[in-house]
Structure formats: C-alpha cells, structure tokens
Amino acid sequence: MTTSHMFNRRQFIKDTALITGGLVIAFTVPAIARKRRLPGNEVPISDPGKMPTPNAFLRIDPDGTVTITLSHCEMGQGISTALAMLVAEELDADWQKIKVEDAPAALVYYHTIYGTQRTGGSSSLYSEFDRYRQVGATARNMLVQAGARRLQVDVKDCKTENGYVIVGDKKLSYGELAEEAATLPVPTEVPLKDRADWKFIGKPVKRLDTPAKVKGEAIFGMDIHFPGMLTALVARSPVPGASVKTYNAKATLAVPGVRQVVVVPGGVAVLADNFWAAKKGRDALKIDWELGQAVRINSATLLSEFRQRANEGGLVATKAGDPENVFPKAAHVVEAEYFQPFLAHAPMEPLNCTVQLTPDKCEIWTGTQTVTDDQKAASEITGLPVDKVFIHMQFLGGSFGRRNITRSDFVREAVEVAKASGKLVKTVWTREDDIQGGMYRPAFLHRFKIGLDSNGAPIAWKQISVGQSVMTGGPFEKVAVINGVDQFSIEGMHTAEYVKSIPDQRIELNTPVWPITVDNWRAVGLSHTIFAMESLVDELAYAAKKDPVEYRRMLYKDAPRQLKVLEMLAEKSGWGQALPAGHGRGIAVFEAVGSYAGVVAEVSVMKDMPLSVHKVTCVIDCGTVVNPDGVVAQMDSNILYGLSTALYSEITFKAGKVQQNGFLDYKVLRISETPEIETFIVPSNEKPGGIGEAAVGQIMPAITNAIFAATGKRIRSLPLAKQDMHGDQHQQEVQIEKTGV
C-alpha cells in the first residue's frame, strides 16, 4: 500500500471521537461523507461536509449502539448479519444494540482477495472472517483498557459480556467507555478468541435486515427519489451490437410528462416526470437501427454450430499422456455430450441507477456488487477524479450476478444519461429490457470420451468444451484467462478429484467470439460444468454396473471431505430404499466455491403427467459455520434457483433478437412447484467456504439422474420443459449400445 493511502490510526480514532463522541475502529483513508434517503423521508442532496461520517468498520456511540460498516453488499444472502456476528463475537457485544450500514466507495473496504471493492464469488464471509473479528477484538481491547483505567484496576481483572466491561459487582457499558477508549493507543496485535469460547459464531441468529424488509422500510435502489428528479428509460438496440442510424422524437416529446430526449451510447434515452410517462414516450420513439452481424444469430442452428466447433477442437487447457492410445485397451468407452442454453439472471428488482452530476462531483445511488468498477466507469465518462465519484449503496433486490457485471453496463449507462441531459435522473430498466437486452450466462456444450478399466474407474479422459468467455475483456482477464483458456469455462472440471489423477487426459476449449453479451451468472462456470460432470459420472456408474453412490465412493476414496458429504447424503436421503413405480432418486456431489455440497433429488415421471420433484436432500461441508440459519437459507436458495433453471430457463434468438420477454415466457419456479428441502451441515473446524453458489449446479444433474432412475431415459440437455422425459427399458438399451457402454 502506498504512503498516500496510509493513515495514522491513532490520530484518526482521536479525531473521530471529537466528532462522534464515541469509539471508531478504522485502518486507512480519511473520512468521506455518506448520504442516503432514509425510510419514509425524501431528503435533499446535501453538502458532504455536513455529514462527517468516517470510513470505519465499527463505531460505538455513547448510547451503546454498535454500528458495523459492511464492505460487502446485502442482496438477500444474509452477509450483513454474518459479518456483524464476527464483530459481535470478538467484541462481546449486546446483539440488540448492533446496527449495520453500507460502506461508501473507499480503499479501506477493498476485498481482501480481489483487490477491488466488490461482492461476488461467494467469498464475502471467508474473505472477511479474520478482518471483521480483528475489528471487534481491537475495540474490545481498548474498551477494557478504558474500563480498567476508570475503575483503577488491572486489565487482567476485567471481563466483558453483553456490551459491558465487568469487574466484580461493578460494570460499565461500552457506551460509557467509548469516548475514553478512543483516546487510547491502538493495539497492533490482539489475540482472537478460542473456538471453544465462541458465543455467536456457529449459533443460529435471526437476520438483521428482516424487520425492515417485513415492514417495508428497507430502501432498494428503485425506492430512491429526490425532489425534481426525472426518470429515464433507454430505447436500446433490438439485437446485440446495433447502433442508432436516425431517430424521430416528435411523438415522444408530445407525451405529457416527457421532458427531454437524448442520445447515449447504445440507444436513445427518454426523460420524464415519472416512469409511466417515460415508458409511453419511449414507446412513441421512431428509431432506424444499424443492425450489424448479430442478425445472423439463430437458436435453431446454434446447437449444430456448437457441434461443428467441437469437431474442430480447441486450445488445450490441460493434458497428460495420450488418452487416444488408452481407449482401445479400455474395458468400456463412454461417449456423451451435454448442452445448456443461454440464460438470463432475472432478479426480482429490475435494474436501476440514480445519478446526479455536478461540475465537481458525481453521486450515484444504486445496488451494485462492483463498487470500484462502477466508480472508475463514472470517472472515465465524466472526467472527474475517482475520489469525486460517490456511490451510495442500497439494498439489492436480488442479483444472481446481474449486478456483478465487470463492464458496469447499467451504471455506465445511467451516468451517460445524466451527462447528456444535465439532470438528476434515475435510469430504470424494465424486466423486459433486461431479459431482452441484458447480459447472459453463455450457452455451453461439453463433449466427453472416457475410458474405464475393468473396475469401472476412469483411466482415459478426453473432453472438448465450447462456449463464450465471461472473463475476456474484464478486470480479471489476466488471472482467469491462461494461454487463451478462460478457466471459468471449464471451472471445476480439470480440478475435479476424479479427473486430476487420471494419467491420460486431454481437455480442450473452443471459445467462439459472438456479439451476444455474456458475463457472470450465479455459480459462473459451475452452473454448466457440474451438470455435465455429474451427469457423466452417473453414466459411468451405470456403464460400470455400479450403484451411483457406490461408484462415487470409489471416485472419492482419497477425498475425505467429499466422501463425508456423500456418506451423510446417502444416509439422510434414504438412498437405496424402495420407491413407488415411476419414482427415482438422483445424486450429484461436487466441490464449489471452497465448499463441498451434495444433493439427492426424488422425482416421479408418470405417464401423461408432468415431472414432479417431491423432495431434495442437501448436505454441505462449508467449513466453519457462522450462522447455521443462513447456510440453510442459502441452500434453499441454491436449490430453488438451480431447479428453476433446470426446469424452465432458456434464452433463444431469432435473427439476433431475444425471443423471451418477461416472467411469462422466461418462466421461474412457482411456490406451488417447490419441493420439500432438507439440508444437513457437516460439522467442521476447517476454514469457512462459500455458500451462495455452493449447490446451484448440483441440483440440475441430480434431477436428470433421478429421471433416468425413474424412466431409463437419459437427459443431456436443458431445460427439461423441452425434453421428452418418458422412456422405457428399450430406449435405455438402445442408448447404451449407441454410446458404446
């Protein structure tokens, strides 16, 4: 860290004590004011100098309130509660006095791994596990010193509990001691609690954000409103990469409430007094588009193009030995191909971003996962220094990666609208806008040829994967794209326990460059690679004439954490117990985001009846658990999001135009379709792993493997809504013969 970014912690704590009358724990960066609309109030945009809120991780006020600053955004995953628990644990705080607030854009809040201020990769908890505990421990140490000084005792005679420093029958609240503690030297090293002494970590705790959301007081980006603010909708290109040739806004400007029409990169923006006027005005726009090459994209021919590219081969991602020399000697050779389509994110809250641009600063109100990227994008557009771009974080109404776009598309566009119009403006995307012109999970084809020995173990592995890169052109390209191979395109494949030890293997990647805009989607590459890998493992098990659980025991014999998940999953799901006719169980176990998760799905496929998913059993080893309730909630979320994807989700193109429009034809799972879900957590003292994306991929092959168990029909392509799931033993025999099993 350079000297210009360093800051005297001791002096900072003393200075902020004068401002707040309490104790602030911070490590770098001077104070920057933060402003946001409070629940139920419309407040004017004020001078930042009037709100001297410091860049700190923790503040203790004289009334005993403990405010914890979140360096990661809350989008429903429960991170605001989990991070607060880490601080509260080491602080010995009164949980009833804990509050959280969102961090401004600042260096001190940079991700400890990614090196920018962002939330993603299911990394928030494990990346902050030490830092947030250290914040609490530092504050507690200083409060104990202050308490010992006031009571004139040795610090060794003091203990802390529930927001108090206690000596015998005397106790002083943290609020009473906060100002005095702020004047003390900041300890450079403070020991953390032993695991046996934890009171918060590992215990179920109710979420801090629930009351505000239940009462309708939580402020999302869409709730932001200021007097005089306009609302903008942008008419964007009907196909990827198109540009405006000419436009006619005469009818638009005649719509009551429409105030302005401006051209921005990628489209034409209509600014109005409210959303409805902006939408009516946009509907009245007449635009002549330069469509470009994207009109050639058609889903009807997409799969054949993927297959052609697979035939051509690709760049070598990993190789060892020569699998082609082994196949003739193998006891069995299995060939299979798996395909997944383009996907939209479809978060519940549509995209939105409010911007006020003045000569000396740019202020942004939105919910975003990529604060640093957005800040830099706004700086580039406005010409202002980065430190003059202020981002006011709001709750995110879901994301699934849509607000983790490395290109900052919706924030960048909103700043362009504010710059072109000169107005305080909230740019809003309708749900149709996002589904038809947003960012997508790339479609992928994975083709395998596997040689098995007489025991059924894989001894030769040949694979070609085809799909667009999500990392090329983004901030992580240098570390994620190695020798032209996007590691996220084959995420988890070459590192899988049952692949990396195979002596003869070759994995290739063919990366087409198409105008379709693709980027991060929940679980990134694992969202399609796990479907392929765990579907394939199921096929290998049947080729080896082994039960799928028994076969995985063999594959994971040297992987104790995966094996423990597998054994618990088999027990808890009742694997092997008899099922009614037409029912089947399927399993998938895989490592994801530093955790190990397995899923068993029980389904039924009856004649002339739709697929029914009756029960899903999940087992996760995510290392040290902070909030068990949060883990269970996230596994529910993983499973339901992945199940919805498996059943229904698909983005298709015709002459370059997306054919889906909203939840009517980009269908998502309904409550009435939700199966029983039971989650079990493996006790562990390992370091924390991720949970936000740990089981999204596993539910998909668990479902298709269960369909096979029930019907004998192997499903290798999603969504299931487009597949014929009714099969019989004859179909299975034909398939086995065809694949060479």
Image (tube, rainbow, N blue to C red):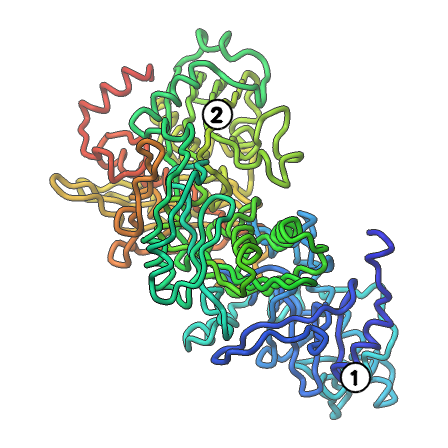
Q: Nearer the viewer, residue 105 or 241?
A: 241
Q: Which residue is mark 1?
A: 179
Residue 488, compared with residue 734, is above or below; it is below
User: Which residue corresponds to the image point at 43% horizontal and 42% vertical from the top-left?
Assistant: 697
Amino acid of disc 2: Pro
Whether residue 570 appears in this view of the structure is no
Q: Which quadrant of the structure image shows residue 429?
A: bottom left
Q: Are marks 2 and 1 in contact (CB under 8 Å)?
A: no
Circle 2 Cα neighbour tier, 10 Å, few/some/many (<14 / 14–19 / ≥20): few
Q: Identify the image quadrant of the C terminus.
A: top left
**Which label was assigned to residue 512?**
2
Q: Nearer the viewer, residue 102 or 197?
A: 102
- Name the spot of residue 457 as percent of width and height, x first: 46, 22
- Name the residue rendered at 60%, 39% in the picture: 474
Badge 1 amino acid: Glu
**In the rendered image of this protein, does residue 449 appear above or below residue 252?**
above
Asked if 569 appears above or below 515 in the picture, the reply is: below
Q: Earlier in the sequence, mark 2 or mark 1?
A: 1
SS of the residue under disc 1: helix
- Which residue occupies 47% across, 25% down? 465
Residue 701, x across and y down, in percent:
37, 37
Residue that sits furthest to the front in the current view = 250
How many numbered discs sit on the rendered protein?
A: 2
Residue drawn at (32%, 31%) of the image = 655
Between 169 and 122, the residue placed more toward the observer is 122
- 560 sits to left or right of 577: right
